[in-house]
Structures are given as C-alpha cells and as structure tokens.
Image: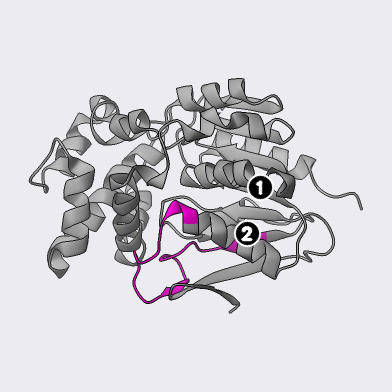
Amino acid sequence: MPYLNVGDGHQLHYQIQGDIRSATPLLFVHGGPGAGVRSADKDLFAGLRRPVIFFDQRGCGLSKYNERLQANTTVELLADIEQLRQALTIEQLMLVGGSWGSTLSLLYAIRHPERVVRMVLWGIFLCRQQELDWFYLQGANQLYPDEYQKFISIVDQPNRPVEAYFRLLNTGNTQQQQTAAMSWARWEAVNSFLTPDQQKIAEFCELTTSLPMAQLASYYFDNHGFIEDDYILRHAGKLEDITTDIVQGRYDTICPCASAWQLAAALKQARLTITPHAAHDASEPENFARLRTILKSIEPEE
C-alpha cells in the first residue's frame, strides 16, 4: 500500500485509480472529520476514465499515526493535500468532496486557487458556529427529538454536547469511549439518509470506523474546525475563476440547504442543484445520480 510520510508521526494512505498522467486527476476529499475513504465512496467514481486519487486524512482510515490528535488541525490537513500533490508531481487538481470534504476542498482552493481547475461538492459545510449549533444543539433535534434524546443521554453536559463527547471519547475508559463513539455515529447516520435503515446505521456504528470519526470530529468541532467563523464566505472571491458544481439534498439535516445556497450566491461560477428528495449522504439516490452525471460530463476526451 502506498503511504506518504507527512511528518509529525503521520503517514497518509493513498490510492490511485487510473493513470494520473493521462488527464487532470480528481482528488476525493472524504468527510468526517475522520471518516476515512469508504467503499461506498468509490462507487461514485466507478468506471470513470479520468484518474482519481483517494487518500485518508490524518488519524483515520488506513493512515498511520503515533498519536491520532497530535499535529492534527485543519492547517495540517491542507498542507497534506499540497504535499500529496507535490509528491505525485501533479500541476492541477479537480476536487471532489462532500460535508467536511467540501469544507477542506473550499479551504484548499482558497489557499491554492492556481492548483484547482474545478470542484464538485455536496452537503455543503462552511464550518460556521451556526451550522454546528444547528446539528448538535438546536435544529436537527426538532426533526429527530427521539434520536436526539438518545444522543445527549450519555453526556453530563447536554447543553454542551460536543465538548462533553470530546471528553468522553478521549479521556473515558474503553467502554465509555466505545459507547460514546457508537452514539455519536448513530446521530450522524440517522441524519445522513432520508430513510435510514438498520443496516446503514449499523455500518456507521461499527467501532473500527465510528471511534476514529467520533474522536476526530468532536476534537475538530470543539475547536470550531480550527478556522475563523465565516472564513470561507469572506474569502469566496479567491474562487471566482473555479467552476464549482454543488449538489445539495433538500432534506439534508446535517448541513442545511441554506449554506449551499449562500455559497452558490458568493461564487461567480457555481452551479447549484438542489435534489428534491434527498438528505446528506452522496449515496442518496438523487444525489448519487446527479453527481455521476456531473463527473461523467467532465470525462477527458478519448
């Protein structure tokens, strides 16, 4: 398996689909923070002629680390993307990402606009306090009060759930960490799909994936994503030359549709599609179909 040593005790796992010399590659930026690349993520790119680069961010997936949270901030994640690009000697990229992956894609493009020729994004997350409050405090709980009660029932500070989960996940005993990870993942799973079934919830709650995701996500969100509030919209002018396709589920209860609407309004070359019967996840049928159509439309010429 190929790994890239990015320092600080971290080695990123990456995988290449196709020949990265044949055309400008797609770089898939996974969500979370901490979700890693899932097998379902790769379905989006199946059979494409354009090359694709997959990588697991610090502390998750198949990437290696000494300490998961050591030197693990948004600044490092963005530097890792640039280091990977340089290591593969690629001049430019097309970024593809949803949720936290959309956040990182936008931040990287703001920092390195000359390296990004296109973006395909979904489930827009601008990492603003209002979005964090919506999902973890007051918003999604109005739609899923029964599930939200389960979510906050295991913490001692229900009015500060992210902070409370972070403490449990990183200082609790093994049983407490596992219970917290599965609870965190269940809340995410329930909100990721329009009609979540038990199999999807069980997949999200599997400990090998839920524990790193919950540890990293609670750590990042307890620190406001390590970015200034409203940073992306305030710097959207740097993205004016980048064609950006946005797919947003109307019933996305993790990342409400308003954020995608505001981002599209701020970008000169944005094309927003609101899928009328879809929630957050890229595998939602309408999201998946639209994203596949977009990706196929930017295939290299034969």
Circle 1 residues within 10 Å: few <14, some 14–19, many ≥20 = some
Q: Residue at x 85, y 50 (%)?
A: 300
Q: Are marks 1 and 2 in contact (CB under 8 Å)?
A: yes
Q: Which residues are magenta?
A: 53-75
Indicate whether residue 57 is drawn in magenta: yes
Task: Say which residue label 2 marks.
Answer: 82
Q: Residue at x 36, y 62 (%)?
A: 209
273 on left or right of 91: left
- Residue 119, percent across and down? 67, 41
Q: Amino acid at mark 2?
A: Glu
> Residue 302, can we see it?
yes
Check disc 1 and report its element: helix, strand or loop: loop
Instruction: Identify which residue is drawn at 42% across, 65% down.
Output: 60
The residue shown at (37%, 77%) is 66
User: In the picture, residue 237 is in which quadrant?
Assistant: top right
Q: Can the viewer see residue 283 in this picture? A: no
Q: Which mark is residue 112?
A: 1
**Number of marks in the image?**
2
Figure quadrant of residue 248? top right
Q: For the stretch drawn in magenta, what is the main secondary structure?
A: loop
- As measured in the structure, the alpha-carbon distance from the residue carrying label 1 to the one carrying label 2 is 9 Å
In the rendered structure, which amino acid carries the disc numbered 1? His
